[in-house]
Amino acid sequence: MTIWCLFKNSVFPQIITIFFFVAVLIQFIFIFYFGKCFRNYTPPKEYDQALSYTKAPVSIIICAKNEAENLGKNLEKVLRQDYISSGKPLFEVIVVNDHSEDNTVAILSDLQKHYTHLVLVDLASQEPHGKKYALAKGVAAARYECLLFTDADCAPAIGSWISLMTLPLLMGKEIVSGYGAYISQNTFLNKFIRSETVHTCMQYYAYNHIGLPYMAVGRNMACTKEIFNKASSSPLYHSLPYGDDDLLVSICATGTNMEIVLHPESFTYSEAPATRRRWIRQKQRHLSTAKYYQAIKKILLGAYAFSHALSWLLFIILLLYPAHMSLWIVPIMLLRVVGLHIALTDTAKCLNEKKLYWSFFIFDFGWMIYNFMFAPYIFWKNKKQWK
């Protein structure tokens, strides 16, 4: 039977319709739960009083490879954080220079003249390259038990960033993930990247809410030194040259020891990749860790992503059969689109991404392409380099 004969067969659209309804039903279940998590969300009261809580000393760790320009723009915003005791900083900032070939060391040496709590760890020429090794050296140099991680191209939203990100550690948590926002620009790619970031946050917050944490944001993450050392001693942690955040969560996170902080003053901001090629390389790295998630988390994440892509694909196919298509197809698909838009809008309100509200309608379809494009890196392929 040829493909054309299959399409002409009146049974075929009926089968497609059944699969379409199943895919949309799965979508409704996820959308209802995601929306429930973010509807009327307000940060816990403790976060609004974070600056008044008793503080513990914190080691902030930044890995830098040819990041002189970014360090020049962002590092002082980290060094000037409002996290002091007796008039002195209650934190240190450790920057690990991972064999940079620009003037990273010169920038850091100059800043050290003004900020005594800035520590430079300069990797020797014979030491290994890569973020995992650089992070380990930074943690080894850290004087304090509370660790806070960010990237050279990130800047904290405000001076209370340390207080907000480490407060859960002082209250008994062992892993904390914040939100890594991207600076808004009026380009299609920037809007898509920011929309995808909101979409991802909606999922990892909702899963953590039911005790199934699966990822953290490495450019805005905190943990105890004990947890970091536990993760880094696992063979799984060294299965990739990157993915330190997600692999730490996979190895050490439980249903009760991790918290997601979504207070607007806890965010970090960085510039989104400026080209499609850079963004694709970044997503290939990020998504390559998914294959190492626990089975139940892979099943749930896969069910949501697959049903999302399948509902759009089958809907498009059914449009080719106007004579056989059920009258309910279009309104049901419209209801799914509106439901997801409401859930994403509620999430965006929490994340100060109000300019993206109308973009979610357009990018809903784009996520179908996204899921198909990156599927190889989710299921079997790896990127081998950090940068």
Image: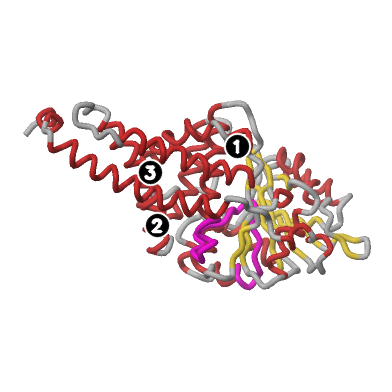
Q: Residues within 10 Å of mark 1 (few under 14, many from 20)?
A: some
Percent across and percent down for residue 364 are: 45, 36
Sequence-wise first label, 2 or 1: 1
User: Which mark, by number, is residue 308?
Assistant: 3
Q: Residue at x 69, y 49 (%)?
A: 267
Compared across the picture, whether 206 is left or right of 123 comes to left
Residue at 76 percent across and 64 percent down: it is: 58
Span shown in magenta: 205-228
User: Type of residue at label 1?
Assistant: Ala
Query: Is residue 54 left or right of 60 when viewed as pictured?
Result: right
Compare residues 241 and 48 and report the one nearer the observer.
48
Tell which circle, 2 or 3, labels the residue nearer the N-terminal end. 2
The quadrant of the rendering that contains the C terminus is top right
Closer to viewer: mark 2 or mark 1 = 2
Instruction: Give the left or right position of residue 328, taking residue 239 as reference.
Output: left
| Local SS, label 1 | loop
Choose between 252 and 204: the one closer to the eye. Answer: 204
The residue identified by callout 1 is 272
Q: The residue tagged with tag 2: helix, strand or loop? A: helix
What's the CA distance linking mark 2 and mark 3? Answer: 12 Å
Residue occupied by mark 2: 300
Q: Amino acid at mark 3?
A: His
